[in-house]
Amino acid sequence: MLLTEFNSRSRDDAIGIVKPALDIPRWYEAIVDGRPYASVEALTEAAANAAAPLTAAELDAALAHHPRIGERAEGQSAEAALARNEQSGVDATAAEALAAGNRAYEAAFDRVFLVRAAGRSADDILALLQERLGNTPEQELAVVDQQLREIAALRLAGAIETEGARA
Ligand code: 2AL
């Protein structure tokens, strides 16, 4: 969709477009109510900064939409299709190592391990997972907040384009 169209859609329509990027009402309402945006860069910057910091409860609710790394998202929802695409660089040979890493992370933090997967290989992700196991719970909250925002900004940039970007 073109940015000009996103800027002029009804509030409800715009929420429907933004929500699959990050399902946190305080966040997507700030994005929608921040319209009009002059550029996709301005929109992704808003994605990085809106409703900061996200609360632990908000993070946990948003994580419910993200399959574990290495687990294929099932179903027809917009979120599932996005997650499958984002994890396309995670090759199946690393499945066991990722499953073990996910278990260690969940035992340590009582939360699904979340990372922006787009543009990262399984090895990149495993290295980040091992590094993050050394974080305190407070540090991890901040990292999860950041990773959710990176995923959301990429999802928005994938859904909304500027005029000149059209072939
Ligand atoms: C995901 C996902 O589905 N897409 C992404 O970038 N990260 N999941 C996860 N547990 O980190």
Image (spheres, grey):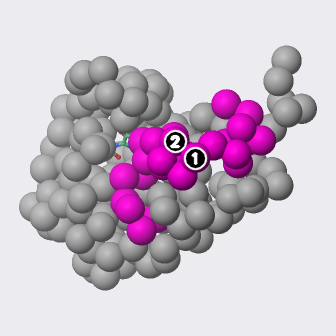
Q: Which residue is mark 2?
A: 13
Q: Are marks 1 and 2 in contact (CB under 8 Å)?
A: yes
> Is residue 9 located in the magenta-colored stretch of the structure?
yes
Q: Nearer the viewer, residue 141 or 74?
A: 74
| Residue depicted at x 30% and y 43% | 66
Q: Which residue is mark 1?
A: 10
Considering the whole magenta stretch, tell me its main secondary structure: helix
125 relative to 129, above or below: above
Q: Mark 2: which amino acid? A: Asp
157 relative to 86, above or below: below
Mark 2 CB near ligand 1 (8 Å cut): no
Q: Mark 1: which amino acid? A: Ser
Examine the rendering and report whether any part of residue 134 can be seen: no
Relative side of 46 to 37, left or right: left
> Is residue 16 located in the magenta-colored stretch of the structure?
yes
Examine the rendering and report whether any part of residue 4 can be seen: yes
Relative side of 134 to 16, left or right: left
Instruction: Indicate the quadrant containing the C terminus: top left, top right, bottom left or bottom right.
Output: top right
